[in-house]
Image (spheres, rainbow, N blue to C red):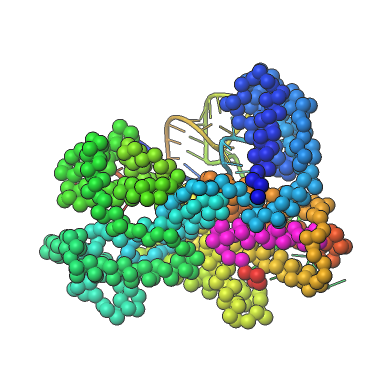
Amino acid sequence: MKKETQLIEQQLSAWCAETFATCFPDADLSDINLRVNASRNEQFGDYQCDAAMKLAKALKSNPRAIGQQFVDTAVLPAIVEKIEIAGPGFVNITLKNDGLASQLTNMIADDKLGLPNIGKNQTVIIDYSSPNVAKPMHIGHIRSTVIGNSIDRLYRALGYNVIADNHLGDWGTQFGLIILGYREFADHDALKRAPVEELERIYVESYNRSKDDATWRDRAKAELVKLQSGDAENRKLWESFIALTLGEFDKIYKRLDVTFDLYRGESFYNDDLAGVIERLEEEKLSEESDGALICNLENDGLNVAIVRKSDGGFNYTTTDIATVASRTAEFQPSEIIYVTDDRQQLHFKQFFHICKKLGIETKLTHIYFGLMRLPEATFSTREGNVIRLDALLDEAEARALEVVKTSSPDMDEAQQREVARAVGIGAIKYTDLSQNPTSLVTFTWKKALAMDGNSAPYLQYAYARIASVRDKYAAKFPDISPDEFPIVLTEEQERRLALKLTRFPAAVESAARLHRPSVMADYLYDLSQAYSSFYQNVPFLKADQGPRESRIRLCALTASVLKNGLALLGIETPERI
RNA sequence: GCCCCGGUAGCUCAGCUGGACAGAGCAACGGAUUCCUAAUCCGUAGGUCGGAGGUUCAAGUCCUCUCCGGGGCACCA
């Protein structure tokens, strides 16, 4: 039986709370945060507790004295070397070297590297990517796809049962225009060559005609009505548009290593929409206004949401409510997570609110991110200022290939291409994942394709160096098995690396909890820096037996953490680079 | 008009539930390669955290006001 892993931070926090309770048995400490946190600055120990300052007021005492009392009464846990009081009343905690070493040994023995199984028996649905049919994906789509996919991976790693659902925009008024346009001026050769581009051209042209041609508008509407009422021919056309588009999308998803468990577009919920309206009316949550049916949420500061248009059609609020109802009934998720850009915030607040009023208790979370902007000067001449996603990926791979060719000229070309693919795609993903999603993002090729510094290639490079060390060790000492030697931390860089390694589970946990892959990226970069410094300054293949094996084990564990950690960002780790 | 998100070093960005002197990368400058992949490492320089008040023992982080940029506010999703 696998013992439940507990994060060091939690362990120390619990200990800290207990100790304070023993120190001050009469005080009510329930409102005060007694947590222990990783020290930001290593001169203040490995972990620190700032509770003494927080308690000062409640206990009517000064923080130094409280800290001192804590230090005097505390019974140190086995893993702790010493505690000290410092500054205004911080308790700084330093871990034992052999305590760290045994943590590492446990991680090595655990194929999950110490990750807690906090998602056991919980289902989470993640709704991300969700592009529209008949429109090519451009750089605006990469954030939802890559961020959503990373959240997906983080949750899975923590034991959640994740359902990744691609909620395609496959239904709506645009299909009337597309069907009509298709009938009138489709270029069938172009449709074979580049189906989505041609579909988009058809849509745009048809849309433009509808703007000042009432007849065209009416004809498009007639096509839409036919489609919606199940006309066999239009239905078939519509299905073919979806198939063509998905065929193109799948190429991109494959390149990005993104897979979905479900592809349920808006059309999937079409039959449920009337029922949603009925429920809203029954619950008296809706009212007529200017011929439309609305939910008035002004009292909640959320304006007004239209649930049925004056022409009788439904819109996305209705669809989204139907989707939640369907998902909760079918999967009983503990949480549904949506990943979209921040323009949709109001919409999500509105329909989350309506769902709650309808008695749906499921936790609904909207992860939003800032739209990608272009620095005007660079791209103003580009047509429509749009960079297609596949073009971006091509460029990334090409750029990476140049670097690979100059850095690894001896590698055969097929392998160079393979490395360039992993590195190029990794660079693109990392750029998106390493920033806080809510930040505004300015797209620059330089940043997106960065190959050094805080970038995926830096992390991949660190990994490849370890792989190389491992192979050289195996060749040089074929008869020695490093795992028979204990991990001993003597050098400064060694200890720093060890400490970082033990924080992997905490990093994964908080990245998932905060829905922020950037936390993971930050951690991995930090770890790689610690490793690179170790690598550069501490010899291992040339060290004596004992330290050598200990260091090899550290290398191996670093490799595992990097590989698994980067996998949580959807980034590959080639063995050679 | 109301609401949301940004404004941190020349540039691009971190900074978790307020915690000890604000951190990276790029660019600049100076070092390191008989040695485990230099896509690396070590170092120097660079910031009144948009501005003004306030709360607090402690504010980049919370509150109020304000300036700048982006976005959203009824039949597109």
The image quadrant of residue A186 is: bottom left
Residue at 35%, 65% in the rendered image: A384
Measured from the top left, where is residue A133 in percent x and y? 32, 64
Bounds of the magenta segment: A549-573
State the residue in front, A525 or A463.
A463
Residue A99: give x, y in percent of width and height: 77, 45
Left or right, residue A373 beside residue A188: right
Residue A276 vertical placement versus B11 (above, below)? above
**SS assignment for the magenta stretch, majority:** helix
Q: Tell me if residue A566 is in the magenta stretch.
A: yes
Q: Quadrant of residue A6?
A: top right
Which one is nearer the viewer's eye here, A268 or A248? A268
In the shown orientation, is residue B64 left or right of residue A173? right
Quarter in which the C terminus of chain A is drawn? bottom right
Q: Residue at x 25, y 50 (%)?
A: A273
Residue A201 visible (yes or no):
no
- Looking at the image, the residue that sits furthest to the right is A544
Question: From the viewer's perspective, is residue A82 above or below residue A488?
Answer: above
* Residue A36: % across, % down: 66, 36
Q: Nearer the viewer, residue A209 or A352?
A: A352
In reply to whether residue A570 is colored magenta, the answer given is: yes
Left or right relative to B50: residue A379: left
Residue placed furthest toward the front: A1
Q: Which residue is depicted at the point 60% across and 77% down?
A: A416
Left/right placement of residue A503 relative to residue A306 reads: right
For image coordinates 17% across by 60% down, the residue present is A229
Between B44 and A553, the one lying in front of the other is A553
Is A166 drawn above or below residue A276 in the view shown? below
